[in-house]
Image: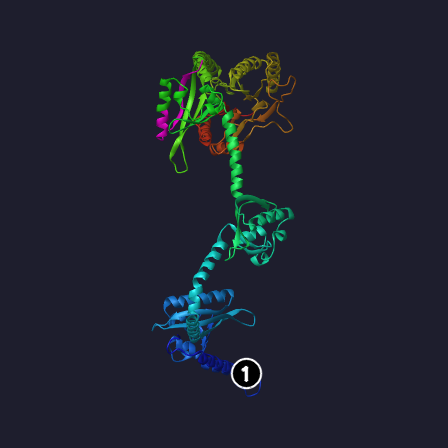
Amino acid sequence: MPNAGAPSRQELEQRIADLKQQNAVLKAQLTGTRPGDPSADDLLQALLDHIPDRIYFKDVHSRFIKCSQAVAHRLGVADASQVVGKSDFDFLPPERAREFFHNEQVILQTGEPLINKTQKQTQKDGEVVWSSVTKVALRGKDGKILGLVGINRDITEHKRAEEALRQSHDALEQNVAERTAELSHERLVLRTLIDNLPDAIYAKDLAGRKTLANPADLINLRCPTEAEAIGKTDFDLFPPPQAEKFWADDQTVLLGQPVINREEFFFNEAGEKRWLLTSKLPLRDAGENIVGLIGIGRDITSRKIAEEALARERLLLRTLVDNLPDAIYAKDTEGRKTLANHADLKNLRRQSEAEAIGKTDFDFFPQPQAEKFWADDQTVLQGQPIINREEFFFDEYGVKRWLLTSKLPLRDATGNITGLIGVARDITVIKQAEEKLAAHMLELEQRNHQTMEELNMARELQMAMLPHEFPSVSSHASAAESDLEFFSFFSPAGAVSGDFFDVVPLSETAVGLFICDAMGHDVRAALVTAMMRALVADLSRTVDEPGELLLQMNRELTGIFKQSGSVMYATAFYLIVDLERREFRYSSAAHPDPILVRRNSQTVEWLKPEPGVRKGPALGLFQDREFPTCRQAMESGDLIALFTDGLVEVESPGNEIYSADRLLAAIQRRIQQPAGELFAELIEEVKAFSGRAKFDDDLCIAGVEVKRLKPAR
């Protein structure tokens, strides 16, 4: 029954007609062009004063510009002018005002309108009112959004009429609804279930035409909608061979014989093979007559792929297990074998796995040994694994065999221990080898001790060959101190070194400074340095030019290395400091350029060959090669440092090289310091750069500083 006091349908229709008539009159006035007609503003104001709809205009900040009298009444003020310049926050609860403000700002920013949105609102007195809300952006001639216009139409009476009409209609059809509600609900539940199941569900009539197809089936059929599938047969949807197979199955089902959980496949539009688990059942009417069939197809492609992958993995695993040399086995909680590979069967003295499955260690081994294995198994079955434990048994010939055994608990999907798996590696040969190795190690330790003693002796001899006192050289006959000050640093990477330097007095005013770096860090390299020391001491007595000395050394070393049949070489640099001539004479055999520090000019540079002159090759490689001699004028305060490559090939922990440029910069920062102090700090900086307390390569530094010079003639 309709609500008491609610307007009748005829009354509502009459109200709507009156409103339409009023709107028609206003529209005619707004569109008229006769002289003397009211202005557009007058017409608009008349419309806003009399139209029942709540019409309002707002600026970009959601403030009212103009509104109808209906808006003013709804906001609780007497006149529309009292609304202008204000916002919803001045009239409505904050939550409601914020909601309107947010929605309007979205429209003002995007330009997207809000059209005929139905809104329900409960008034302060509890009355429920309904509105149809339209809000659109208000644009200027240039298209820029200047604000918005909103129209709220009160549709409360319409909604009440609808509700009254619905209740009346419900009352009239209540009996029918009660009779059909259960059936409709069941049909809805069934259809919802069918449409949302991942399985493909379909129905066909006796002619094989589709009468139902859920979304999962439509994917298999490659049809976007059910309407495109209804009425079609498999011949319209699949290739002929596949459709004929489906048709034959359908005919069997239509004769009353169902198909249950049969695996079959088809190819999708991408050519991929898809597997279905299919069931088909006869569809009968109320009289038990077969009128079609219903089918269910579950996509089991992932399962089939997983099964195939699992089968491959099982085959791979079994092949691996059977062919590993380690004995691999599994037992249940009673100690019975459930798996035994070929290596394990050999230990058990059985020919086939079938002879071992179901048996325990008491069936294969003597009682004491089986009891020991059983005790181990019980520990593992309590959850405590055994990892790489050495144990032994006696084979059929009474030979003691050693195994490296690991046993792990075997758990099911829920984490319960259902047995154990064991791996036993035959280490008999290893154990026998260990005994032999122990004897060899003892012998090797004795030999190593002897070798270390010999190396220590060689190190002591090599250190003894290095200069420990430097000559006093002066260009002044009455000078009490040397005009030259020498300094050195020597750090072998091993017991003996391939680096070496020597200082050779040549005359009262000249001295030779020699440095070399032989290939390697072993005894051979140390022997080469010893030979080179002897050659320098011998040749420096008769040879005046550094290049000639290197030339003769190269000839000697090349001949020696050739006779020995080994490949050896050494880089070298020979410098003569001549106070009488006030010059440095030098020659290089592929050796790093020395550092020249000019204290007078406060510069640090490389002592390179003269322009157009190339270094000679490393000593001992080529028989007849030239080693040019170069000259450099000498000044008081000059400092020359010869060094081996261990100083500039140092790497930091980040794999950065201590470069030659970094070396020059480090010396430049310390150019005022005495030579010994300068290079001591430099070495500490290089160590800090490398992050290590020792150098990885042999390092040798030898240098000389000119303290004073006799005035030039």
Query: Would residue 300 be visible to someone looking at this image?
Result: no
**Which contiguous range is marked in magenta?**
376-396
| Residue 596 on the magenta segment | no
**Residue sitting farthest toward the bottom:** 36
Q: Is residue 140 left or right of residue 393?
A: right
Question: Which residue is disc 1 drawn over?
Answer: 28
416 relative to 108 in the view: left or right: left
Looking at the picture, which amino acid does disc 1 mark? Ala
Out of 525 and 708, give the one closest to the viewer. 525
51 and 376: which is toward the camera: 376
Q: Identify which residue, 242 or 303, lies in the foreground.
A: 242
Residue 476: give x, y in percent of width and height. Answer: 50, 20
| 561 and 283: which is toward the camera | 283
Against 35, residue 452 (above or below) is: above
Q: Residues within 10 Å of mark 1 (few under 14, many from 20)?
A: few
Rendered position, 208 above or below 590? below
Q: Position of residue 11 (x, y in %)?
A: 44, 81
| Quarter of the figure that contains the N terminus | bottom left
Describe the element under mark 1 as helix, strand or loop: helix
